[in-house]
Image: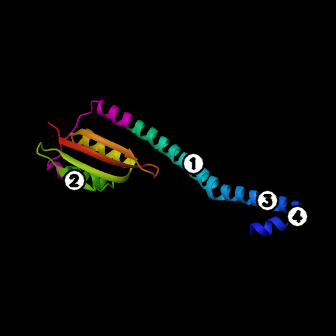
Amino acid sequence: MHQWFNQLRHREQIIIGLGAVSLAIYLLYILLWQPLHDNALELERQNENLLSSLDRVDAMALEIEGLRHSGRQTTVKKGSLQQILNSAAKRHGLTASRIQPNAKGEIQMRFEGIPAQALIAWLHELEQQRGILIQDASINTTATANRLNAVVRLAQGN
């Protein structure tokens, strides 16, 4: 190949050299830069969605805190804590992926990919209408808008 290239006229060598450089630049663009650029744009879009979800979760947390401190009277429905939690969750279309009672009489429930408003309504019902205490809640956004993963530890109120 080298011998063939040397046999070409100087002008042809320059044209072939420029073509090879152009091809190399094109291949770098297509194989390297374009996929990286597309990935960066996708990550920016995901970041914007997560920030939007975080803003909604922050607003919901403020709403929960406001409802918690509103001082409404609560009525505790008879039945075991687990029965109350399960029936309230079903009313709001929620299904726990894990329910784990502990030695203190508390119950930890895990939800995955649930609607944000359903979680807020469920927690509100439990605390304000059923007298259930929300001991701890860990709420995370998912890649899907308005969907959350949550782990909530609940106890029977006095």
Name which residue lies at 30% across and 54% down: 91
Which residue is nearer to you in this view: 134 or 131? Answer: 134
| Precedes in sequence: disc 4 or disc 2 | 4
Residue 7 on the magenta segment: no
Query: Label 4 belongs to which residue?
Result: 9
Percent of width and height locating residue 47: 51, 44
Viewport quadrant of the C terminus: top left
Name which residue lies at 37% across and 36% down: 61
Q: Residues within 10 Å of mark 4 (few under 14, many from 20)?
A: few
Seen in the image, is 116 located left or right of residue 158? Answer: right
Residue 99: image tag: 2
Q: How many marks?
A: 4
Give the residue type at disc 1: Ala
- Residue stretch in magenta: 61-83
Name which residue lies at 33% across and 33% down: 65
Percent of width and height locating residue 22: 76, 57
